[in-house]
Image: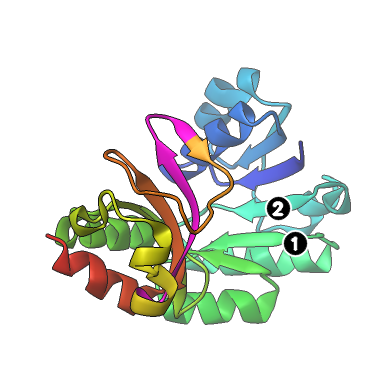
Amino acid sequence: MISVLLIGMGKFGRTLGEQLLEMGDEVMIVDKNEDIINKLAPRYTNALIADCMSADNLETMDIPSFDACIVAIGEDFQASLEITSNLKDCGAKRIVSRATTEIQRKFLLRVGADEVIYPDMDIAEKLAVRLNSDNVINFVDLDAEYAIFEIELPKKWLKKSLIEVNPRGNYGMNILTIKNNGEIVYTISGDYVFREGDQLLVFGNTERILAFTNKQK
């Protein structure tokens, strides 16, 4: 459980807030819209109507006491920029800010963000990948070159052993774990034989894995 200050309760902020609550986190929400705060306040640890572009307002919130401060504003970049900078000045431990462009990301990092997220871009990217490769169930980027993918078992691997397929040597991917009908195979030895319904969690170069999965269509 962590304590989170969530600034900006638009659609993205509300969705994130719900997810944090489900994980048992303590969440304080802040928005300058009184109607939004009054509606959401009963669900959260604390709620405040305030304009966080004011450093004075932020100083009353004991910013260093939060494990993470999230600037979830997407429609007003100037506000996001100033709030991120103010949070840094107030001693925030970790600042996560929302951006919609690469230029915004650079500015947010420059004024104090520890991490910058692109929710709309991430959704679009994941949809594009899934549309172009039926075998990809989900994926998480680790950096510009590498990612973890959840993929369907390639048909040509069925009833073959791991050592026969040799995913690392032949396809440049490491199998982290295998899931089948909700059960997870935690220890995978070379004599493991791939079964119908196997779903693979693999790590490797993003372009190489996508090129491989596209050939399996």
Element on which disc 1 rests: helix
Residue 171 spot, x, y in % from top left: 34, 75
**Closer to viewer: mark 1 or mark 2:** 2
Q: Nearer the viewer, residue 100 or 212?
A: 212
Q: Quadrant of the N terminus?
A: top right
Q: Main secondary structure of the magenta part?
A: strand
Residue at 19 percent of width and 60 percent of height: 133
Label 1: few (<14), some (14–19) or many (≥20) C-alpha neighbours in 10 Å: many
Query: In the image, which disc is placed on residue 52?
Result: none
Magenta region, residue range: 171-183
Residue 45 spot, x, y in % from top left: 73, 26
Q: Quadrant of the C terminus?
A: bottom left
* Residues at circles 1 and 2 in contact by the CB criterion of under 8 Å: yes
Residue at 48 percent of width and 75 percent of height: 104
Residue 209 sits in quarter:
bottom left
Q: Which residue is mark 1?
A: 87
Element on which disc 2 rests: strand
Above or below, 21 against 55 in this view is: above
Q: Is residue 75 visible?
A: no
Q: Is residue 21 magenta?
A: no
User: Viewed as shown, does residue 6 lie left or right of 178?
Assistant: right
Residue type marked 1: Leu
Label 2: few (<14), some (14–19) or many (≥20) C-alpha neighbours in 10 Å: many
Q: Nearer the viewer, residue 56 or 89?
A: 89
Q: Is residue 179 magenta?
A: yes
Measured Cα–Cα span from mark 1 to mark 2: 8 Å
Q: Which residue is mark 2?
A: 69
Residue type marked 2: Cys
Above or below, 136 against 197 in this view is: below
Residue 20 sits in quarter:
top right
Residue at 39 percent of width and 69 percent of height: 166
User: Viewed as shown, does residue 213 lie left or right of 25?
Assistant: left
